[in-house]
């Protein structure tokens, strides 16, 4: 069964998505997510200009070989663009194999290891009242785990904090601004560190001990500041503190780890197992944040998580709305099947996106389930996708009060 046709579809139903569509000679279609927020066209070009010709005529069943070929062959390895492109090829081939076998992909990965995948949603607010409303909305929707982000006094806007939901409206945070150059925001680490522990104290006092609470520091702290924050949050029993330091310096986590027992999650900007070598081997983290979409697909993330499992480290796959429904489905199939599943991030997509991508996964009682459809269980409505051409959009950049560019 050979790959006959390769299409790369860029669509923007509220935000940009890149989807790889492989069609075999006998008409089986496989989909892969290649969305890289703010660099969508780079991955689309990589796939169209450098990968597509390698795929035409290849045996669609040979997933491992078709992973190794674009990874080892072209001399240049790793990096977010390359690994998102390889991820899309890998997902599409698993989708095809599942459809041909008549089985959902998680069955091909070893079958079900749990009833469903525990997922966390995002709550935020510029005031405690707004934050509490957002938390209540998520709890009403079944979430048992919630990421808490809060506005910081003195800062006009804080990344990860959406418009307040006082009227009970849907969480509508779209961090990527549709502008030709990124918007700049102000950042003040000291003000943030002073404010956040009080927010968690208020949330615990209001919502009790059972709710699982998470927090994302978006790589903005030094190791010492990360250690301070982890320690300050210990009384509030976090499920995890995410991305406390810039991710490329793996050793930084040693210092954080020495000073706090708050569980640590890292890796949404990593793209291979090599980025985790030291932090897994030295047990410097508790959760691996890599998404299937940005880390070489199901094949590579499965290997990464099997490595992590030897050190009692669990999955915490990245699942913001810039991972498409195809990438989310792939994460759910993998999460259902592995033993060391931890939690899945889950931000619901908007109505337009749900029309472009017909999904079969379900959300019940705080758990995600990929569904029983053969393959990944997501179909792309190409006509609907065609209504939404690409729109340039970027995440904000940060500057300190004196104008210095600051970390993510
Ligand atoms: C998260 C993330 C996102 C990212 C975004 C980048 O934990 O969900 O940090 O908010 O910033 O996905 O593209
Ligand atoms: Mg994050």
Image (spheres, rainbow, N blue to C red):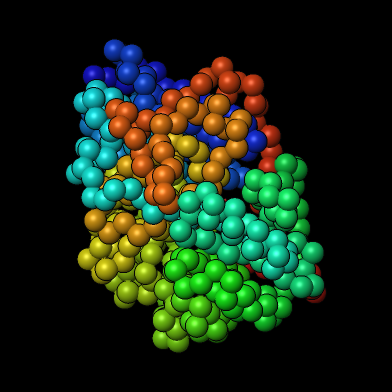
Residue 394 in the image: state x and y as whole percent. 67, 47
The residue closer to the viewer here, 144 or 55, is 144
Residue 146 position in % (x across, y down): 52, 60
The N terminus: image quadrant: top left
Tell me if residue 151 can be seen.
no
Q: Is residue 209 left or right of residue 389?
A: left
Query: Outermost residue toward the bottom?
Result: 259
Residue 295, placed above or below residue 215: above
Task: Pick out the residue farthest to the top.
Answer: 26
Q: Is residue 90 left or right of residue 145?
A: left
In the rendered image, residue 103, in percent from the top left (x then y), is placed at 24, 30
Closer to the camera in the image, 258 or 198: 198
> Which quadrant does the C terminus fall into?
bottom right
**Quadrant of res 28:** top left
Seen in the image, is 305 located left or right of residue 35? left
Q: Is residue 183 left or right of residue 350?
A: right
Of residues 109 and 116, the one drawn nearer to the viewer in this rendering:
116
**Residue that appears at 25% across and 63% down:** 309
Q: Quadrant of residue 363?
A: top left
Q: Where 159 falls versus 251 (above or below)?
A: above
* Residue 156 visible in the displayed image: yes
Q: Is 216 or 336 nearer to us in this picture?
A: 336
155 over 110 or under it: above or below = below
Tally the numbered discs.
0
The residue under the point 71% across, 78% down is: 191
At 36% from the left edge and 50% from the top edge, which residue is drawn? 117
Which corner quadrant of the image does residue 259 belong to? bottom left
Which residue shows up at 50% across the image and 38% down it?
324
Q: Tell me where residue 342 appears, x and y as whole percent.
A: 35, 60
């Amino acid at each position: 069964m050979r790959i006959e046709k390769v299409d790369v579809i860029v669509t923007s139903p509220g935000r940009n998505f890149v989807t790889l569509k492989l069609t075999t000679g006998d008409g089986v279609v496989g989909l892969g997510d290649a969305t890289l927020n703010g660099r969508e066209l780079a991955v689309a070009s990589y796939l169209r200009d450098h990968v597509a010709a390698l795929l035409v005529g290849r045996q669609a069943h040979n997933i491992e070989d078709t992973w190794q070929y674009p990874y080892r062959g072209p001399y240049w390895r790793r990096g977010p663009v390359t690994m998102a492109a390889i991820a899309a090829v890998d997902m599409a081939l698993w989708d095809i194999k599942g459809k041909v076998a008549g089985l959902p992909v998680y069955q091909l990965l070893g079958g079900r290891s749990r009833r469903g995948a525990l997922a966390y949603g995002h709550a935020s607010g510029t005031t405690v009242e707004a934050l509490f409303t957002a938390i209540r909305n998520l709890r009403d929707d079944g979430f048992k785990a919630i990421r808490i982000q809060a506005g910081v006094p003195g800062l006009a806007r804080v990344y990860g904090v959406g418009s307040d939901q006082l009227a009970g409206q849907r969480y509508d945070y779209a961090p990527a601004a549709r502008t030709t150059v990124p918007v700049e925001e102000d950042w003040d680490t000291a003000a943030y560190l002073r404010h956040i522990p009080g927010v968690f104290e208020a949330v615990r006092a209001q919502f009790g001990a059972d709710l699982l609470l998470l927090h994302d520091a978006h790589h903005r702290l030094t190791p010492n500041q990360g250690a301070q924050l982890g320690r300050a949050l210990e009384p509030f029993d976090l499920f995890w503190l995410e991305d406390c330091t810039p991710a490329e310096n793996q050793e930084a986590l040693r210092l954080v780890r020495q000073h706090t027992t708050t569980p640590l999650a890292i890796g949404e900007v990593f793209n291979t197992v090599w980025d985790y070598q030291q932090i897994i081997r030295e047990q410097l983290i508790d959760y691996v944040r890599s998404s299937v979409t940005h880390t070489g697909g199901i094949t590579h993330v499965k290997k990464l998580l099997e490595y992590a499992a030897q050190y009692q480290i669990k999955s915490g796959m990245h699942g913001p709305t810039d991972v498409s429904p195809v990438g989310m489905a792939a994460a759910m199939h993998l999460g259902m099947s592995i033993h060391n599943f931890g939690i899945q991030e889950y931000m619901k997509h908007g109505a337009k996106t749900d029309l472009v991508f017909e999904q079969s996964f379900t959300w019940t009682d705080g758990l995600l389930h990929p569904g029983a459809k053969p393959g990944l269980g997501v179909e792309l409505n190409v006509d609907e996708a065609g209504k939404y051409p690409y729109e340039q959009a970027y995440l904000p950049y940060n500057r300190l009060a004196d104008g210095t560019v600051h970390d993510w």
